[in-house]
Amino acid sequence: MFKRLVAGVMAAAALYVPSTQAATFPQKPVRIVVGYAAGGPTDTIVRIVSEQLGKKWGVPVIVENKPGATSTIATGYVAAAQPDGHTLVALANDFVASRFVYPELKYDAEKDIALIGMLAITPNVLVVSKESEHKNYSDFAKALKESAGSWSYSSTGVASTSHLAAERYKLLTGFEASHIPYKGFAPSLPDLMTGRIDFALPSLSSVRSHIDAGALVPLAVVGSERSRFLPDTPTFEEAGVKDFNIQTWYALGAPSGVSDEILEQINRDLNSVLSSEETAEKIRNQGTEISLMSREEINRLVANDVETVESLIKALDIQMN
């Protein structure tokens, strides 16, 4: 009897795993799925962060690109993944807009994706070609008002942040301009830089190198204060355009169902690597600013964006087939 009791206790002990060990994360390589092509702003920032997270966690952190359908393919893929924290998704503002313009998404943005933390934020900036006769915002706005209807602007696609930023600008100012959508920023560059397209309102991270090279001229930047990267460029508020608050952000998410304990750990570790001056400098070199946020803070930011974007998309009557 005693021998059987001892054997039973030993068998139970062999199966027992302390709760701290069971909760250890990560236990295998982590994937971060990016819904955009390699080399773009989201991909570049994620690769900087993934390298540092891999060092901190002691496991490979693999970046996997699944571009298409304004990043909804990647988001849907992660929404259906095992909710153990080992499959994450890179998010940008399209995560907010897509829920209003794609009628048959295979996931519920609010229920199926848990927000983890912010990677970086970059302002949108009004740019014109170096060939443009308008070298400051005042002259540009005056000309736009005097010749309404004959202007054009480019975007990276319908309901993209650059599209919504330009439309928000039009609503706030009453100016008119025709929308010319492109399949990404790179295809729009030749027309924008030669002046065949009059202006654009892309993220600073996507045009900083072209501004530095002198091919594009910045006239005004979104935000409450001037960008450190464009200290001589006024904000829209300084230029007289109030309540212009659309900007581009990059974040991490996970499938819903991942434990709060793991989500909090990823948030802490993410903010830790972003606090490194080495990592921060690499990200700032992309024309973005580090933004350390708790899970509560990023949820609040996205909720505010949802309210702004929903009303704008309804006003514009945008819907994808």
Image (cartoon, helix red, strand yellow):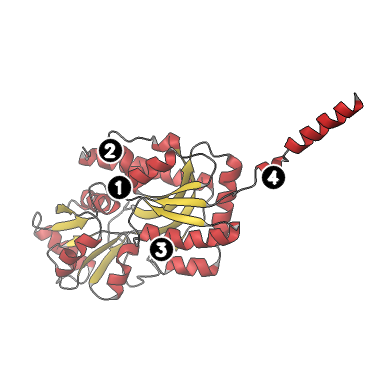
Label 1: few (<14), some or many (≥20) within 10 Å? many
Give the Cα separation between the discs numbered 3 and 2. Answer: 28 Å
Residue linked to disc 4: 21
The answer to whether residue 34 is above or below residue 10 is below
Q: Earlier in the sequence, mark 2 or mark 1?
A: 1
> In the rendered image, which quarter is residue 271 located in?
bottom right
The location of residue 131, given as percent across then percent down, is: 15, 73
Image quadrant holding the C terminus, namely top left
Q: Earlier in the sequence, mark 3 or mark 2?
A: 2
Specify whether 25 is left or right of 211. Answer: right
Give the Cα separation between the discs numbered 3 and 1. Answer: 21 Å
Residue linked to disc 3: 288
Give the Cα separation between the discs numbered 4 and 2. Answer: 42 Å
The location of residue 200, given as percent across then percent down, is: 22, 60
Give the Cα separation between the discs numbered 2 and 1. Answer: 10 Å
Q: Decide: marks 3, 2 in contact (CB < 8 A)?
A: no
State whether residue 224 appears in this view.
no
Tell me the SS state at disc 3.
loop
The location of residue 223, given as percent across then percent down, is: 36, 59
Residue linked to disc 2: 102
